[in-house]
Amino acid sequence: MNMKFDLTIEQTQKLNLTQEMVQAIKILQLNSTELERYVDEQVLANPVLEKDLIVRENYSTSTGFRKEKPQGTPFKQFNLNEETLSEHLLHQLQFVKAPKGVIRVCEYLIDTLDDNGYLKQSIDEIAEIENCSGETVHRAIRVLRSFEPAGVGARNIPECLLLQLKAKGSCSNLKARVIKNHLEELALNRLQQIAKANKTSVETIQKISDEIKTLDPKPGRAFASSEETRYITPDVYLEEVNGEYKLTLSESSKPGVAVNQYYMDLLEGNKDNEELTDYLLERIKAARWLIDSIEQRRNTIYNVSKAIVDYQEEFFSQGEKHLKPLILRQIAEQVNVHESTVSRTINGKYIQTPRGVFELKYFFTSGVSGRDGEDVSSKAIKEMIKELVDNEDPKKPISDQKIAEHLVGKGIDIARRTVAKYREEIGIFSSQKRKRY
């Protein structure tokens, strides 16, 4: 065996992330609510940090930073105590006159309904759990099904739809047969087959189909969930002033935090105490790094948002059909940062605009080529498809091929299968299912 030992020098590049750099990256990817919570944690952990309660003056500079003046009540201040399905049903139960055993079973049924308002347990299971007869359970179910919203207490979709029709007083034998036997065909718009099977006209089945579509197969979904409601706090505000778009950062993106002056004075007056001095210097350094990281986050959000707004200006002035394809690299090159920085910046951050509130990620979209050399975003194409379908003759709906041909005529090079993909993504049925008789 020939073993050789050599001493060689090799030059390599390696990035070592310091604790401060890791903190800066973490702060950048936090949204406003998370940042505020993180700052509170740091204030508790670092005694030299304090919440700055001084109201900052409004100011406007070349960077566009200023304290916003909210018009109206901010959305996050609304915290409505919405009623849950259980609360709604228990309130109605208070006015029911029935034996205590039936009321007790009703309370149990209400407590076990799923989010859609459906019953999932069998009569025997409920009777065993509540130690009562099957007749008592049946009576309790009848009471529950008499409540609003109509359809609650059903076991499946057909039963739910029938309960709603009965509550409206319009449940004919033909409608019941269509719901029980032809729901799948109804979903596929095969009205001629349904009409033939029930020996009636297609027009009659069309009317039944229209009525069924007005019913709610998930009546429980209209009520508040027991889960915590999440509110959106915009990080950036965009407003149009005299024909120009002005970008403003939310003050929530710069939580008031500062170094406590008491500890600065303590450091100045105890320079001979080496142990205390080292501790205070370390804590003050950490505090200032946090403050600098928050300011850097603020600058990055502004710069990235400004680049997005400049690039997508036609969207804000003319609508979704004018949204351009955009990728991370384009903004990264313009702002002179890495793509990963742009990705962290746009994730979970929202901008409030004259056209609504959007996550910054919304403006990054793929596209297809146009004949004039400009790409067209997928969102813009989807809006065009939606517009074509909205204006079609319902008795002769436009096919995917016709939509593709129409878009090609506008200079957008797109295939039929791509049209079908985009149509499905925006929840539009195929031409066969859209046809009316």
Image (cartoon, rainbow, N blue to C red):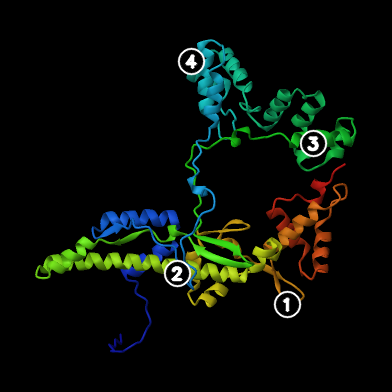
Nearer-the-camera pick, 141 or 146 = 146
Give the structural element (helix, strand or loop) at label 4. Answer: loop
Give the structural element (helix, strand or loop) at label 1. Answer: loop
Give how far apart the Cα atoms at labels 1 and 4 are. Answer: 75 Å
Which one is in front in this view, the residue at disc 3 or the one at disc 2? Answer: 2
Question: Residue 383: x percent and y percent?
Answer: 72, 58
Amino acid on which disc 2 is placed: Asn
Residue to which mark 2 is pinned = 299
Give how far apart the Cα atoms at labels 4 and 3 are. Answer: 43 Å
Counting residues from the N terminus, which is met first, the one under dot 1 or under dot 4? 4
Amino acid on which disc 1 is placed: Gly
Residue lying at the far top of the rendered structure: 99
Vertically, is 27 above or below 424? below
Residue count near mark 1 (Cα–Cα under 10 Å), binned few <14, some 14–19, many ≥20 = few
Counting residues from the N terminus, which is met first, the one under dot 2 or under dot 4? 4
The picture quadrant where one finds residue 40 is bottom left
Counting residues from the N terminus, which is met first, the one under dot 3 or under dot 2? 3
Amino acid on which disc 4 is placed: Asn
| Contact between labelled residues 2 and 3, with CB atoms less than 8 Å apart | no
Give how far apart the Cα atoms at labels 3 and 1 are. Answer: 46 Å
| Contact between labelled residues 4 and 2, with CB atoms less than 8 Å apart | no
Give how far apart the Cα atoms at labels 2 and 4 are. Answer: 66 Å
Which one is in front in this view, the residue at disc 3 or the one at disc 1? Answer: 1
Which one is in front in this view, the residue at disc 1 or the one at disc 4? Answer: 1
Residue to which mark 4 is pinned = 131
Instruction: Identify the residue at horizontal 46%, vertical 61% (top origin).
Output: 67
Q: Is residue 30 in view?
A: no
Residue to which mark 1 is pinned = 373
Q: Number of numbered discs present? A: 4
The picture quadrant where one finds residue 437 is top right
Q: Quadrant of the N terminus?
A: bottom left
Q: Is residue 195 left or right of residue 340?
A: right
